[in-house]
Amino acid sequence: MQAKLAHTMIRVRDLDASIAFYTGFLGLKETRRAHFGEECTLVFLADASEQHYIELTCNHDGRDYELGDQFGHLAFTVEDLDAVIAEVEDKGWWYRGNRPESSSRYIFVKDPDGYDIEILQAK
């Protein structure tokens, strides 16, 4: 069998805040939205290649979520990490950079729900 990744789903509390983060800050675009009445709304976001998707799932029943310790992070590459760092600092967001011993350049930020987002300098 040869499998192909379809998408990664994360549950979000505030759909509008999450869409703003992933589209406004990371530059993903909304490709599809599905409403399931009072149950939930699904929003699919894609990178420019439209080969990698994130599904934002917002359940409408008022439940809250705890971040599990099995999930690590989502990772994105950018052409200019210094510009990203300047934007993050301008927004006053928390971030942490790569360790001095690391050979790659990256930072971690948190999305509106507290998920770790790694942003790597493209090679």
Image (spheres, helix red, strand yellow):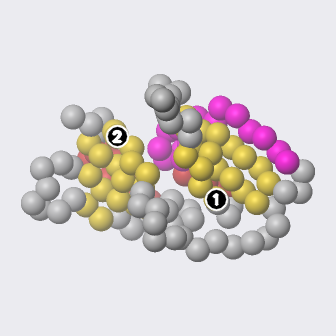
Q: What x and y, as percent, mark residue 30?
A: 64, 36
Which amino acid, by three-letter code, is at mark 1?
Arg
Q: Nearer the viewer, mark 2 or mark 1?
A: 1
Q: Residue at x 47, y 44 (%)?
A: 26
Of the pair 32 and 21, the residue shown nearer to us: 32
Of the pair 25 and 64, the residue shown nearer to us: 64
Q: Is residue 112 left or right of residue 105?
A: right
Which amino acid, by three-letter code, is at mark 2?
Thr
Which region shows up in magenta? 22-36
Q: Which residue is under mark 2?
A: 77
Q: Residue at x 77, y 50 (%)?
A: 41
- The numbered mark, 2 or 1, whose residue comes first in the sequence reads 1
Q: Which mark is residue 11?
A: 1
Element carrying mark 1: strand
Q: Is residue 108 left or right of residue 13?
A: left
Dot 2 crowding, Cα within 10 Å, few <14, some 14–19, many 20+:
some
Can residue 90 be spotted in the picture?
no
Q: Residue at x 64, y 59 (%)?
A: 11
Q: Is residue 74 left or right of residue 11?
A: left
Magenta span includes 115: no
